[in-house]
């Protein structure tokens, strides 16, 4: 079982006060905010079904989001269903949410065993390079996340075994959560794409303390667009907060349900709140313009102190919810 427990790197900066950034800003929020883009997503809380397109229950890309890099599609296949994916300028990971599938691309066939649901176990996955065609087929049907990022390098298609997915226990006490680092920046090679899964036991907070990655500060903070895709155990609900890091920046308080997504072009994001008795799942998909594929964040200066309390508390005993050994 590949399970670790660690704290994330965080940085406090004297130029950040009361949630506002004083100093150079890399991006103009009016340029990058999807709410200002004609013909694009106008609500950063994308409710289930509101961004459906053809076989996709959810279809978010740079064009619809009004940004440059990150994409997420949720493909639904009936039993015996087949879908052709043209990767274009993006690299993609096929991640089973429920069910298994076969992924076929030039010279490669990957059999993904998948899983019953996101709450039942770690899953295997397939990486697809840019400028490729792939066929995704499922004999029993299922739902499959396609996490993508525009990129430059064309890496080889690869299979990611469930047994090699690092499972991290992050935080302690009621900030405890499980992170499946299947495509974190330091665990699986991609050109720009970063993607992880987070499971938060009922009643706990995750994505906490609030943090951001919307400025380029070498060695301190990287610029990453981010998509949160949610599922909630037993048809429950959860809450997610994004607060502005700059004047006119992203400001969202969302009641999220299964199939919802939240787009984060900028801002302090967190907490994500799981309801009592229901595990909250989200898939994080990130990409950005930096020369280095790295995940560097800064904590909100009003809330970062919570990390100092974690060493004095135990990890929630409900974790891990599962590990690689529980994969199908």
Image (cartoon, rainbow, N blue to C red):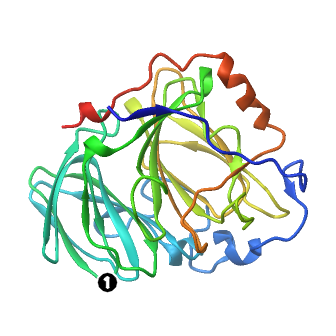
Q: Is residue 211 above or below residue 325?
A: below
Quadrant of the snapshot with the C terminus: top left
Residue at 25% x, 31% y is 326
Residue 103 seen in render:
yes
Element under label 1?
loop
In-image side of 20 versus 5 (left or right)? right
| The one of 292 and 76 positioned closer to us in this rendering | 292
Dot 1, crowdedness within 10 Å: few (<14), some or many (≥20)? few
Q: Is residue 9 above or below residue 235?
A: below
Residue 236 seen in render:
no
Residue at 36% x, 79% y is 154
| The one of 51 and 221 positioned closer to us in this rendering | 221
Quadrant location of residue 251? bottom right
Residue at 82% x, 64% y is 248
Q: Would you name the residue on which mark 1 appears?
A: 131
Residue 238 horizontal/vertical position (percent): 55, 36
Residue 323 horizontal/vertical position (percent): 33, 32
């Amino acid at each position: 079982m590949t399970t670790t427990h660690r704290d994330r790197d965080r940085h406090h900066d004297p130029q950040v006060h009361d949630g506002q950034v004083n100093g150079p800003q890399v991006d103009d929020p009016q340029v990058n905010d999807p709410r200002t883009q004609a013909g694009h997503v106008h609500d950063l809380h994308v409710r289930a079904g509101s961004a459906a397109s053809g076989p996709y229950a959810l279809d978010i890309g740079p064009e619809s989001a009004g940004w440059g890099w990150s994409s997420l599609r949720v493909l639904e296949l009936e039993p015996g269903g087949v879908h052709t994916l043209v990767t274009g300028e993006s690299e993609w990971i096929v991640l089973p949410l429920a069910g298994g599938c076969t992924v076929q691309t030039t010279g490669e066939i990957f059999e993904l065993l998948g899983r019953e649901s996101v709450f039942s176990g770690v899953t295997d996955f397939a990486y697809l390079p840019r400028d490729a065609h792939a066929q995704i087929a499922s004999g029993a049907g299922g739902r499959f996340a396609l996490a993508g990022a525009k990129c430059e390098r064309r890496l080889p298609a690869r299979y990611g075994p469930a047994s090699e997915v690092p499972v991290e226990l992050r935080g302690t006490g009621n900030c405890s959560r499980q992170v499946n680092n299947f495509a974190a920046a330091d665990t699986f090679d991609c050109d720009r794409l970063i993607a992880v899964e987070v499971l938060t036991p009922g009643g706990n907070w995750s994505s906490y303390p609030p943090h951001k990655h919307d400025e380029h500060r070498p060695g301190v903070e990287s610029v990453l667009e981010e998509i949160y895709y949610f599922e909630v155990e037993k048809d429950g609900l959860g809450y997610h907060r994004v607060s502005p890091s700059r004047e006119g920046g992203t400001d969202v308080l969302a009641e999220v349900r299964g199939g919802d997504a939240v787009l984060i072009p900028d801002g302090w994001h967190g907490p994500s709140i799981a309801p009592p008795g229901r595990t909250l799942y989200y898939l994080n998909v990130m990409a950005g313009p930096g020369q280095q594929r790295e995940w560097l964040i800064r904590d909100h200066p009003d809330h970062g102190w919570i990390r100092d309390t974690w060493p004095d508390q135990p990890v929630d005993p409900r974790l891990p919810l599962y590990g690689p050994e529980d994969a199908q």
